[in-house]
C-alpha cells in the first residue's frame, strides 16, 4: 500500500510539474525586435546621432496580460563614461505592437537621454564598435513620472512593479 501511495503521489507531482511547465510554454514569449536590424547586427546609419537621428522601429509581442504599462531603456554599456542612455520611455500602452520609426508613441512619457534631450539620441561612438541594448520592461502599474525624467528616476519608479523584461541588441561602429 505504501509503495502504491508513493507511485500515485509521484505521478501526481509529475503531472503537476509537467502541467505547470506546459502552461509556461503556452504563454507567448515577451519579445522586442527591430525590423531595421537583426539581433546583434549593425544598426543602420540613418538611426545614428550624426545622421538622420531617427529612432529605429521596434516590434513588441507577448506582453504579459497583467501589464498596465511598458517602459523602454536604450543604452550603450560600452561608452567610456559608463552606460550611456540613448532613449527613455515610460507609460507606453501595454497594447502597443509597434513603436514606429522616428517618434515615440503618443502614450509615452519621454525621459532625458545623456545628450541632454528628452528625445531619441542615436548611436555616436567616438571609436570602435559599441553595443546598443533596447530593454523593454512590462510593469504592473503606470509610473508617476514627468517628461524629462532621468534613468535613476525611472529605475526608482519601476521598483516593485516589474513583471518581465525583454531586450534586443544592435551594434554601431564609429565612422
Image (cartoon, rainbow, N blue to C red):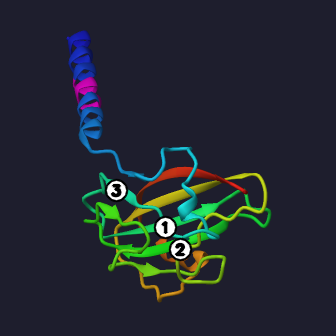
Q: Nearer the viewer, residue 157 or 114?
A: 114
Q: Residues within 10 Å of mark 1 (few under 14, many from 20)?
A: many
Q: Residues within 10 Å of mark 3 (few under 14, many from 20)?
A: some
Q: Give yes or no for residue 98 being in the magenta stretch.
A: no
Q: Secondary structure at mark 1?
A: loop
Mark 3 vs mark 1: in front: 1
8 shown above or below 107: above
60 shown above or below 28: below
Identified at 57% across, 81% down, the residue is 112
Query: Distance of mark 2 from mark 3, alpha carbons?
Result: 18 Å
Please indicate whether residue 1 sits to the left or right of residue 161 in the image. Answer: left
Q: Nearer the viewer, residue 78 or 3?
A: 78
What x and y, as percent, mark residue 75?
61, 63
The outermost residue toward the bottom is: 146
Identified at 46% across, 74% down, the residue is 89
What label sits on residue 60 in the rendered view?
A: 3
> Mark 1 sits on what residue?
55
What x and y, as percent, mark residue 129?
71, 50
Quarter of the picture containing the N terminus is top left
Identified at 77% across, 63% down, the residue is 126
Q: Give yes or no for residue 16 being in the magenta stretch.
A: yes
Q: Secondary structure at mark 3?
A: strand
Query: Distance of mark 3 from mark 1, alpha carbons?
Result: 15 Å
Quarter of the picture containing the C terminus is bottom right
First along the sequence among labels 2 and 3: 3
Residues shaded magenta: 12-17
Do the numbered discs 1 and 2 sit on residues whose CB atoms are within 8 Å? yes
Query: Distance of mark 1 from mark 2, alpha carbons?
Result: 6 Å
> Mark 2 sits on what residue?
120
Prevailing secondary structure class for the magenta stretch in the rendered image: helix
Q: Nearer the viewer, residue 115 or 28?
A: 115
Amino acid at each position: 500500500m505504501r509503495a502504491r501511495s508513493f507511485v500515485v503521489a509521484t505521478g501526481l507531482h509529475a503531472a503537476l510539474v509537467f502541467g505547470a511547465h506546459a502552461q509556461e510554454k503556452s504563454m507567448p514569449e515577451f519579445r522586442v525586435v527591430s525590423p531595421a536590424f537583426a539581433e546583434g547586427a549593425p544598426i543602420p546609419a540613418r538611426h545614428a546621432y550624426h545622421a538622420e537621428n531617427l529612432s529605429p522601429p521596434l516590434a513588441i509581442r507577448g506582453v504579459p496580460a497583467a501589464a498596465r504599462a511598458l517602459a523602454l531603456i536604450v543604452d550603450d554599456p560600452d561608452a567610456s563614461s559608463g552606460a550611456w542612455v540613448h532613449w527613455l520611455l515610460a507609460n507606453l500602452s501595454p497594447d502597443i505592437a509597434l513603436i514606429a520609426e522616428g517618434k515615440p508613441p503618443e502614450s509615452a512619457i519621454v525621459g532625458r537621454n545623456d545628450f541632454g534631450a528628452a528625445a531619441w539620441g542615436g548611436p555616436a561612438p567616438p571609436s570602435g564598435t559599441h553595443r546598443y541594448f533596447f530593454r523593454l520592461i512590462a510593469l504592473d502599474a503606470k509610473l508617476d513620472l514627468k517628461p524629462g525624467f532621468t534613468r535613476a528616476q525611472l529605475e526608482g519608479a519601476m521598483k516593485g512593479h516589474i513583471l518581465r523584461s525583454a531586450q534586443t541588441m544592435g551594434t554601431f561602429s564609429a565612422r
